[in-house]
Image: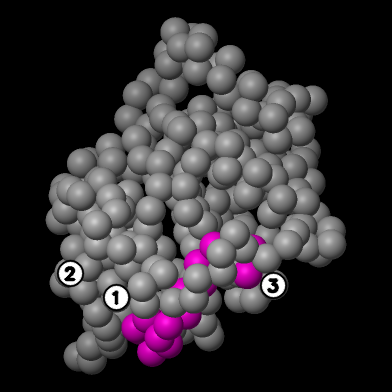
Amino acid sequence: MSDLPSQGEQAVLEAIDVHRDYSIGSSTIPVLKGVNLRFLPGETVSLVGRSGVGKTTLLQILGLLDRPTSGQVKVRGRDVSQLSRSQRAEVRRREIGFVFQFYHLIPELTALENVMLSQRIGEPFLQALARRRSERERATALLERVGLGHRIRHRPRQMSGGELQRTAIARALFAKPSILLCDEPTGNLDADTGAAILELLFQLQTENRTALVMVTHDLEVARRCERLVTLRDGRVEKEELLAAGMPPIQ
């Protein structure tokens, strides 16, 4: 389609003929069957489709948490899919933020420490906290930005679901990533809290001009994005351009 991202535009993230198979006993189960997608800086894209079509598998491959069986994943034009584990982790730290349905916060750490942790993996954490005052200040500012200035020293068990997800959003944006991957970010929240989290997510994505790729089963949420990608049977069935997205959920 001519109104979808053209080959001449510089993509921040690409999937090129991505296949992913899983082995169960002597059987091979194909989940992704040749996915081709390009994501531009600052655009918002939703991935939809029935359960089992490969949405989460694709997101994990795009986020370098898994490798394709064949095909390529490129970040800023560089093939990163076959890098070593440590090299992929470094690309994730620099370029990719994650927001998951179930938060994945460390229960023993405060909100501030959870936000900073994404950049301290592989380093002595307490030493990093002591010598990186600027990062502490930036994490504090992010938590204040998402409405959690009063929760900086609280641990996850002391916070509500909406506050946990706000902390997770702050953590995802801490490294100023060029790519933000979201897997059902409002799926574990009530309708009102989910709508508020979605508004915050899109607002921060716009401010930071981050490419946002969101897996969701909710078409109303999906149509908030500029582009809607439907997966079916492990392939891209269709792509729809939604201009500036649909109006906010009331």
Residue nearest the viewer, comparing 145 with 114 = 145
Give yes or no for contact between labels 2 and 1 (Cβ–Cβ under 8 Å).
yes
Which residue carries the number 1 mark?
Answer: 35
Q: Give the label, 2 or 3, closer to the camera.
A: 3
Residue type at tag 2: Gly
Secondary structure at numbered mark 2: strand
State the SS at label 3. helix
Instruction: Read off the residue under disc 3.
Output: 220
Left or right side of 29 for 114: right
Q: Is residue 74 above or below residue 113?
A: below
The quadrant of the rendering that contains the C terminus is bottom right
Q: Measured from the top left, where is residue 163 in percent x and y?
A: 74, 43
Which residue appears at 20% of the width and 49% of the height? 77
Per the rendered image, the range of residues in magenta is 223-238
- Using a 10 Å C-alpha cutoff, classify the residue at mark 3 as few (fewer than 14 neighbours), some (14 to 19) or many (20 or more): few
In the rendered structure, which disc, 2 or 1, sits on the residue that comes first in sequence?
1
Mark 3 touches mark 1? (CB < 8 Å) = no
Q: Given the current orientation, which residue lies at the most extreme front position?
A: 2
Image quadrant in which you'd find residue 82: bottom left
Q: Is residue 138 visible?
A: yes
